[in-house]
Every structure is written in C-alpha cells, then in structure tokens.
Image: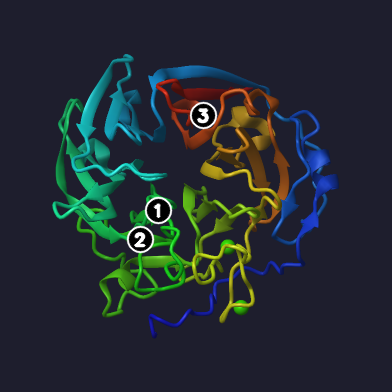
Amino acid sequence: MNPTTPISAGTRTGTVSTGRRRATKLALAVGLLAGALPVTSGAAAPSSRVAPAAAPTLSVTTAVSGLDHPWDIAFGPHGRMFWTQRERGSVMVRDGRGTRTLVARVPHLWVSGETGLMGIALHPNFSSNRRFYTCNGHTEPDGSHDVRVIAWRANDAVTSASRIRPLVTGIEVSSGRHGGCRLRFGSGGGLFIGTGDAALTGNSRNLRSLGGKVLRVDPLTGAPHPGNPFVRSSNRKTRLILTYGHRNIQGLALRADGIMWSVEHGPDRDDEVNILRKGGDYGWEPGPGYDESVPMTDNSLSGVQIDARWSSGFPTVATSGAAWLRGNRWDSWEGALAVAALKDQSLRIMRFNAAGILVGVARPGALAGTYGRLRAAQMGPNGVLYLTTDNGSGQDRILAVRAG
Ligand SMILES: [Ca+2]
Ligand SMILES: [Ca+2]
C-alpha cells in the first residue's frame, strides 16, 4: 500500500451520516433526572427508541488536593493511584494508605502552550514488570523540541522510578499548541498514543508525520504493532500509525468489547468522539496557513472519511479525557462513556449502543460548572470514576465520583 495515499477505511461501520440533526427529544427522554442537554450528533439517529432510564445519584469528593494541572491518572495494584502534572513534570503516586510520593520527574521537559508532561499508562503486567509510560514535550541539547513517549521502571516499593528509554520520539511540535498526548493500552497489549497535529497544516493526513494520529506500538521495544495498517512501509513513522486525520486527540478509552475510542477537540465547532478503525481517516485537513475553517470530518477529501459518533455542534466544549463507566452502581449509565470537558467545565455521560450509535447524553448537575475545567477521566477500583481539574495555581484536585 502506498503510505502517502489516504486509504479507504474498509472497516467503516454501517452508520450513514445524514447530516447534523438535533436529538433533542431523545436526550430529554434519557436524561430527565440528570440535567441532560439537547445534543447534536454527527452519527445517524438511533435505530430504536430507548426507554427513559433513571440516572444514578452522584456524590463527588476530593481525593487529592493542592495539585497543579494534573493531566492524567492511572491505577496500579494495591490501590495505588498515579498522576502526572503538566508543568511540574512530576509523576506522583498515592499508595493504598494515602501516602503521597514523587516517583519521577521528567528530565529535559518542555512546557509550552498545551504541551508539558501529559499522558501516563501502566503496563498491563505492571505488578510483575513495574513498567509504566509517560508522554511529554522534550528539549534536545541543541534546543529543538519534540513530543515523546518514555518507558519507565518503578522500584518494588513504587517509591521511585528510572527511565528505561525513550519509546517513541519525533512527534512533531510547533508552539506547543495541539500537543496531544493520551496513552492507553489496547486489549491486545499494544500501547496507543493519541497525538495532536501541532497546529501545523499538512500533519494530520500525512502518513510521514506522527502528528494528528493514533499510533500503536509494542510497549517493550517501541516497534510498530504487528497489526498496524502500514506496518510494511519503509518509513519509520508510517509504520507506527493506526489511524490518521485527527486534530488533537485528548482522550482514549477502551470499551469492554476491546474497541478503542477517541475524543478530540474541534476548532470552533464539532468536538468529536470517534470509534477507532484500523487505517481509518478521520477527515481533518486544515487549509494553507492552518486555516481551520474546514469541517472536523471533511467528507469531500479523497477516500472515505469516518464520521464521528458524537459531535458537539457549535460551539465546542473542549472535550478531553474519557472513561467507560464500570460497575452496577452506575445503574443505567453502566457501560456509558464519561467525557470530561475543559471549556464547558462539565462531565458528559454519553450512552452508545453495542453498534456504537449514540442513544443519549446527560450532563449531571453535580459536575457542571462546580469544579472548573475537567481534564482527565479514569476508572479506579470499586467502580469509582476519577477526574482531574485543570485550573492551575496549585488549586487543582483529583475528584472521586461515586454513583448510587
Ligand atoms: Ca473527524
Ligand atoms: Ca471523501
């Protein structure tokens, strides 16, 4: 396959975009108790009526306070919670007894605009190999920058960590705008890396750039995942690509069926939630001079573009991290996607059916405008959802959200 030619996504689902239609009636039916908003959906209308379902009552507590731009969260054995702080470049761990430890500080950190220390993910075998991964803006000795993924190994007590190696380097940057970078493991053990387009024209759909992509790599070697669509390409970067045509991936979330979903920022309209399909083109291609007055999914581009499963319409709300809700205390929201939003300062609960079609969106009042900007979402032990705030000035927190 010619790696420079956008491919047709043969795995596209059966949904046919019928344009943006308001799902007001449905949203009202689903979210009677939860402050549901009318939403626009880039996907087709639901194929069947969904009975109104009672939303769970939420309680929100502060798990950790006194933080500064906590960007991502991960959970390890024995109740350990990891988090990153974007500007401080610190990887912190709180153990099961509540003791907080600085485990690592990223060297040569480059903090600029939206870029700094961002995503974190623990290897699925962390309990035996102690490996984890971070993604950060980096400064080279010559003063140049990139975004890169670093592999770390923690000591047995998980009180310190040493760098094993940079796993993926050369993710393009410009000013620090649209730096990505979320890390999550897939069901097959590959490490997914969601990147931003660096606010540069010509990255997103260019298969020789790592910007505006979802990459998938072997977490031990950094080699391309053997199932990647362009794995036989002669180009190092092309081989790492799973999907392309993204603007700025802020969320990745693995559904229980093993399918990875992404969350992206739109320009002035159309934040998106997408199902990731191998080799898929998600249709973002800004014009010369980074002209953003183009659709988030531009179907007029060559080849087939994959439509979003949810989009914000106008204006954007700046959707960021996302997690699938697990545990029966979530009641009718079990299996729904919880999506944090920065600009809109709220959490959205998006319910999709097994085919990935949106059936309802709720915006729980307990998390709407109460805590400022919400950055990360991650499920912890016992069916508790954790969120980070992103307001700065050392006032940020990690919130624990319990249902039932
Ligand atoms: Ca798109
Ligand atoms: Ca097209």
- The residue at 82%/39% (across/down) is 28
Q: Quadrant of ligand 1?
A: bottom right
Looking at marks 1 and 3 on the same chain, the residue that comes earlier in the sequence is marked by 1
Estimate the x, y position of residue 185 in percent, counting from the top left.
37, 50
Estimate the x, y position of residue 228 in percent, counting from the top left.
37, 69
Residue 221 appears in which quarter of the rendering?
bottom left
Q: Amino acid at mark 1?
A: Gly
Q: Would you place residue 352 above or below residue 117 in this image? A: below
| Callout 3: SS | helix
- The residue at 43%/63% (across/down) is 200
Q: How many marks?
A: 3
Give the residue at the far bottom of this rendering.
2
In the image: residue 129, left or right of residue 47: left
Q: Amino acid at mark 3?
A: Gly
Residue 307 appears in which quarter of the rendering?
bottom right
Q: Amino acid at mark 2?
A: Arg
Determine which residue is flagged by label 2.
216
Q: Would you place residue 23 above or below residue 57 in this image? A: below
Determine which residue is flagged by label 1.
186
Q: CA distance from mark 3 to mark 2?
A: 28 Å
Determine which residue is flagged by label 3.
383
Residue 20 appears in which quarter of the rendering?
bottom right
Looking at marks 2 and 1 on the same chain, the residue that comes earlier in the sequence is marked by 1
Q: CA distance from mark 1 to mark 3?
A: 20 Å
**Does any atom of ligand 1 lie closer than 8 Å to the CB of label 3?**
no
